[in-house]
């Protein structure tokens, strides 16, 4: 086989390998974006379940779950019983005592993926408002400039994710 024929075959192999590599990179990126979107939808679904329970609690009692001090608490169940900024918040009995079993059968397990600046945040946080007449929910959506999906939630960039704040007056 001539030297130029060998070069031509090697060049063709190089081109094929390059095309295959680009295709694999594209497929991996698209599938990761799909997984992020699925996790975001699941997170929003959990929050909406809590919103329904909060609304039912409000209809019965005239207040949202409230501890008298407006103490933020982890929303959901966490293996370490702690969430948010480097585990600075802990689960409280507020949500369990207010919602279970009448409004919710159980607390959902929350994805403990790390979010935000320096990947310092995990979970979802509930913050009761004054006298239990309002509340806020803080949560992250994976990816920059993501929609918070829930009506009235406001998002802002935080690292490579989007911090969403839902405020119910």
Image (cartoon, helix red, strand yellow):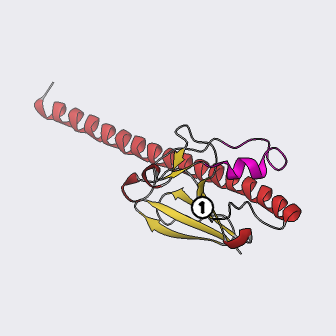
Q: Position of residue 108 (x, y in %)?
A: 68, 43
Q: Which residues are magenta?
A: 92-108
> Residue at horizontal 11%, vertical 31%?
3
Badge 1 local density, few (<14 within 10 Å), some, or many (20+)?
Answer: some
Count of numbered marks: 1
Residue 32 placed where, x, y %? 49, 46
Q: Quadrant of residue 73?
A: bottom right
Residue 151 in percent (x, y) is at 69, 69
124 sits left or right of 56 in the view: left
Direction front: furthest residue: 68
What residue sits 56% from the left and 48% below the top? 34
- State the residue position of label 1: 71
Q: Position of residue 47 (x, y in %)?
A: 68, 55
Q: Residue furthest right?
A: 60
- Residue plotted at (40% across, 61% down): 159
Residue 107 in the magenta stretch? The answer is: yes
In the picture shown, does residue 15 fall above or below 58? above
162 above or below 33? below
């Amino acid at each position: 086989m001539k030297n130029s024929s060998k070069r031509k075959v090697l060049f063709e192999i190089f081109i094929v390998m390059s095309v295959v590599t680009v295709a694999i990179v594209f497929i991996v990126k698209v599938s990761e974006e799909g997984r992020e979107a699925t996790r975001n939808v699941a997170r929003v679904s959990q929050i909406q379940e809590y919103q329904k329970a909060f609304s039912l609690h409000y209809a019965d009692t005239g207040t949202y779950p409230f501890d008298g001090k407006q103490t933020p608490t982890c929303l959901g169940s966490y293996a370490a019983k702690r969430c948010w900024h480097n585990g600075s918040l802990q689960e409280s009995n507020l949500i369990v005592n207010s919602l279970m079993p009448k409004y919710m059968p159980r607390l959902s397990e929350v994805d403990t993926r790390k979010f935000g600046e320096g990947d310092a945040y995990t979970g979802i946080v509930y913050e009761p408002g004054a006298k239990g007449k309002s509340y806020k929910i803080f949560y992250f959506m994976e990816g920059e400039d993501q929609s918070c999906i829930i009506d009235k939630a406001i998002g802002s960039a935080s690292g490579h994710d989007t911090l969403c704040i839902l405020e119910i007056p």
